[in-house]
Image (spheres, rainbow, N blue to C red):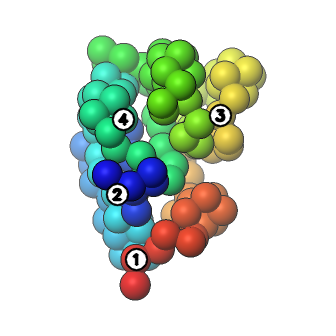
Amino acid sequence: MSAVDHNILVVEDDPALRNAMRDLLGEEGFPSTCAENGQVGLDLLRAGARPCLVLLDLQMPFVDGLTFRRRQLEDPRIAGIPVVVMTGQPSREAEAKRLGVSHFMRKPVAPSHVLGVVEQYCAHMKAS
């Protein structure tokens, strides 16, 4: 497996939003892998996935977004993968930023805003 996959990891428990993100990214040439909660996302990373970016919801069952980020930071193999938070919980922004997230977006998020942030991290990997 390459050091960085040509991929974005979307960690979102809402199936409609998860699928919409996958479709949006795919239409713009950004392949993605989806996880329905933080534990599944961590399992993918620990199994060797190295996305250029993680798009992370905060409020999820099993392992929420902030717990995902804490556990990610504890593992040197995956700690450096940038994380962008997308959440309906603006009160969690300070905590997320203390955990070193790269960007914080409040839901609802305009597709153009998502794509602009993704371009910053993954433009060099855009599928042709």
Q: Compute the Cα span from label 2 to label 1.
A: 11 Å
Q: Residue furthest bottom?
A: 128
Which comes sooner in the sequence, label 2 or label 4? 2
Q: Residue at point 32% right, 39% down?
A: 48
Q: Compute the Cα span from label 2 to label 4.
A: 13 Å
Amino acid type shown at disc 4? Leu
Query: Which element carries disc 3, helix, strand or loop?
Result: loop
Nearest to viewer (mark 4 / mark 3): 4
The quadrant in which residue 8 appears is: bottom left
Q: Which mark is residue 32?
A: 2
Which comes sooner in the sequence, label 1 or label 4? 4
Residue 112, x across and y down, in percent:
58, 68
Q: Compute the Cα span from label 1 to label 4.
A: 21 Å
Which comes sooner in the sequence, label 4 or label 3? 4
Query: Which element carries disc 4, helix, strand or loop?
Result: helix
Q: Is residue 101 left or right of residue 109?
A: right
